[in-house]
Image (tube, rainbow, N blue to C red):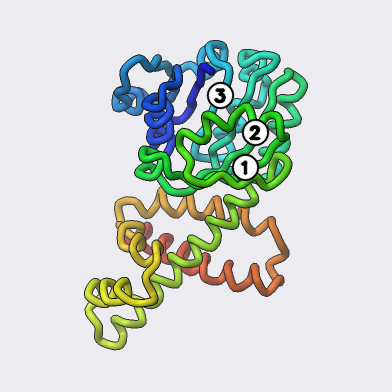
Amino acid sequence: MKVGFIGLGSLGAGIAHRIAQSGFDLVACDVSAAALAAFEEPGVELTSDAIATAERVDVLCVCVRMDADLEALTADGALFRALGDGGLLIIHSTVSPPLARAVAEQAKGFGVDVIDAGVSGGSPAALKGELSIYIGGEDQAIERARPLLQSYAKSMLVLGPVGRGMEGKLLNNLVSIANYGMSAAILDLGQKLGFEREALRQALMAGSAESFALKAVPGLLRPEGAVAMRQLLGKDVDHARELAPAADPSMAALLDAAQSMLDRLTRLAANA
C-alpha cells in the first residue's frame, strides 16, 4: 500500500511521521515550503503538488484546516481522476458532515472510495500511535484502510456511512470546547474569591476536577494564538450547531459553555 498525505500541519505532520515510521511507502504533500522543509523522514517523497501525490498512491489521506481547503482540493474532480479507479480517500480534516458526504458522492463517479475519519488526540498522540478515530464509510473501504489507520490509532469507532465519522468527531470537539469554557470559568471564579489562578488550577487537577480541559486551557488562551484558535474552534462549534436544534436542552447546555470559550478567545484576540 502506497500512501499519500496532504496537509503537514501540527496534526497532519504527526500522523504522516507515524505512517512513515510504521513502514508504509509515503508521499507527503503541503503547499507550504516551510512545512515541507520541516518534515524530515527517511525515504519519504516530498511535494507541493496534490495531483502528483494522488497519481503516485493507492490511498490518499487529507488533513487540511478548513472546509474551503477540502473543497478547493476536490471541486473539479482532478484529485479523484489522479487517484484513479479503485483509489481510496481518507478525510482526516474536521469538516461538515454534508461536505464529507458530497465529496464521497463525487468521488464515486471516478471509482474512488471515501471514508471520513475524524481524529482526536493531537500530534503527540499521533506520533505514539494513540489517536482516537471516528469513522464513517462502507465496510469494504474501512477494511482496506484498517491496516493504515491502526498504525496511528489506539481506538477506532466505526459509526456508519460517510458523514457519521464527522458527526462523532464534532460531538467530541463540542464537549471538549465546552469543557475548556467551563475550566476557564472556574478559574475566573476562583480568582474573584481571592485564589491565585495557577495554584488553584494545580489544586483542582489533584482532585476530582482533574480533566484534560483543565490541563490544556492555559495553553489554549495564549494571546499570540488566539486568532487561529478562535477560527478553528469556532468552525467546529458552527458545524456542531447543525447536529440538533439549538433549543434542544442537551445542545443548549453544550453550546452555552462552548460559546463562553469562543467569546473569551474573541476578547483575547482583540486585546492582543
Query: Which kind of residue does numbered mark 3 sit on?
Result: Leu
Question: Going by the image, does 2 lie left or right of 108?
Answer: left
Q: Are marks 1 and 2 in contact (CB under 8 Å)?
A: yes
- Image spot of residue 181 (x, y percent): 45, 68
**Circle 2 sits on which residue?**
142
Question: Going by the image, does 177 lie left or right of 77?
Answer: left
Could you tell me how far apart the alpha carbons at marks 1 and 2 are, in whole angstroms?
8 Å
**Residue visible at 43% across and 60% down?**
266
Mark 1 vs mark 3, foreground winner is 1
**Residue nearer the viewer, 173 or 264:** 173
Q: Quadrant for residue 214, please give it.
A: bottom left
Query: Which kind of residue does numbered mark 2 sit on?
Result: Ile
**Circle 3 sits on which residue?**
60
Could you tell me how far apart the alpha carbons at marks 2 and 3 are, in whole angstroms?
13 Å
Where the C terminus falls, by quadrant?
A: bottom left
Q: Residues within 10 Å of mark 1 (few under 14, many from 20)?
A: many
Q: Are marks 1 and 3 in contact (CB under 8 Å)?
A: no
Could you tell me how far apart the alpha carbons at marks 1 and 3 are, in whole angstroms?
16 Å
Residue at the farthest bottom position: 193
User: Helix, strand, or loop for circle 2?
Assistant: helix
Q: Earlier in the sequence, mark 1 or mark 2?
A: 1
Q: Earlier in the sequence, mark 2 or mark 3?
A: 3
Give above or below for 44 relative to 135. above
Query: Which kind of residue does numbered mark 1 sit on?
Result: Ile
Give above or below for 13 relative to 4. below
**Residue nearer the viewer, 150 or 83:** 150
**Circle 1 sits on which residue?**
135
